[in-house]
Image: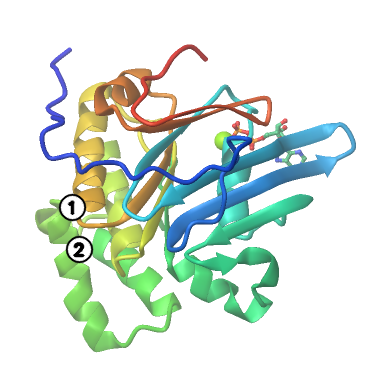
Amino acid sequence: MTEPEITDTAIPPLSVAQENENGRAVPVAGAAVMFDSVTKVYEPGVTALSDVSFVIEKGEFVFVVGASGSGKSTMIRLILKELDPTSGRIIVGGRDLSRLRRSKIPQLRRNVGCVFQDFKLLPNRTAAENVAYALKVQGENQNSIRRKVPEVLSLVGLSHKMNSLPDELSGGEQQRVSIARAFVNHPPLLICDEPTGNLDPDTSVGIMQLLYRINRSGTTILMVTHDREMVDKMRRRVLALSEGKLERDERRGGYVGE
Ligand code: ADP
Ligand code: MG
């Protein structure tokens, strides 16, 4: 396999979150995401997350790894307030989600872009229409939609495929459309649940480079992945979940075991 061309040279220094004497994350002004002793029990005997604490600072690129069923997707759904924790506190973009009014949830979700393994594109709409539709749902006016859609599709390298339907695009191209859709309003936080899970290694490298570029523009990225090689290569912070517990939080660690 060809070596992914991801270099360390331009990686900004990682900020160090504060910890109290127990090594537990404490609130940091301006943190992008904070979990403070978060537990999520779906039903008796099914504890998806157990006493998980961490702080992600603005601008960080953080991987979340762990075996299937370890609680990764639950973590993402909690950040989007699709679920509420059984106990503990979650802060996203300075807002305590337990105090967030229902009417403010759409605003939260506008500030958190999401990318998924299966792209979730509308099959009967072109690349441009998929991005435009997301803006329309958010109440954007036609003028700004007309301006923003070509801009973001160019950013992801798809200007020439604007009018293609999803089934006319490769997997990597479809994922670029879905990243364009998630990023079109430049949300401060982008969360990605196995974005390269359906892609071959070379295509995955291209997607990682795109996410890396987005991160360098200042967007915080939280990425769930099974791609061990990529995690090792990027040398970024890794949160490792094991059976719902935060097993490791390594600042520049590699991906060790599963
Ligand atoms: P991962 O994304 O790491 O594979 P999940 O967060 O999806 O893990 O799941 C963690 C645990 O919670 C698993 O045991 C899973 O079966 C359980 N779980 C996930 N979603 C639900 C749900 N809606 N209802 C009940 N149990 C669930
Ligand atoms: Mg999952």
Whether pointer 1 and pointer 2 mark residues with C-beta atoms closer than 8 Å, the reply is yes
Could you give the CA–CA distance between mark 1 and mark 2, rounded to whole angstroms?
Answer: 6 Å
Counting from the top left corner in percent of width and height, residue 141 is at: 32, 88
Amino acid type at circle 1 is: Val
**Mark 2 surroundings within 10 Å by alpha-carbon count, few (fewer than 14), some (14 through 19), many (20 or more):** many
Is residue 197 rendered to the left or right of residue 207?
right
Residue located at (29% from left, 46% from top): 174
Query: Would you place residue 24 above or below residue 258 in this image?
Result: below
Residue under the image location 31 percent in, 70 percent down: 185
Ligand 2 within 8 Å of the CB at mark 2: no
> Residue beneath label 1, please?
156
Residue 130 is left or right of residue 102, and the answer is left
Provide residue 63's location: percent of width, then percent of height. Answer: 41, 35
> In the current view of this chain or complex, which residue is farthest to the front?
21
Q: Which residue is mark 2?
A: 152
Q: In this rendering, is residue 254 above or below 111? A: above
Left or right side of 43 for 24: left
Regarding mark 2 in the picture, which secondary structure is present there?
helix
Q: What residue occupies the far right of the structure in this picture?
A: 44
Q: Is residue 218 visible?
A: yes
Q: Secondary structure at mark 1?
A: loop
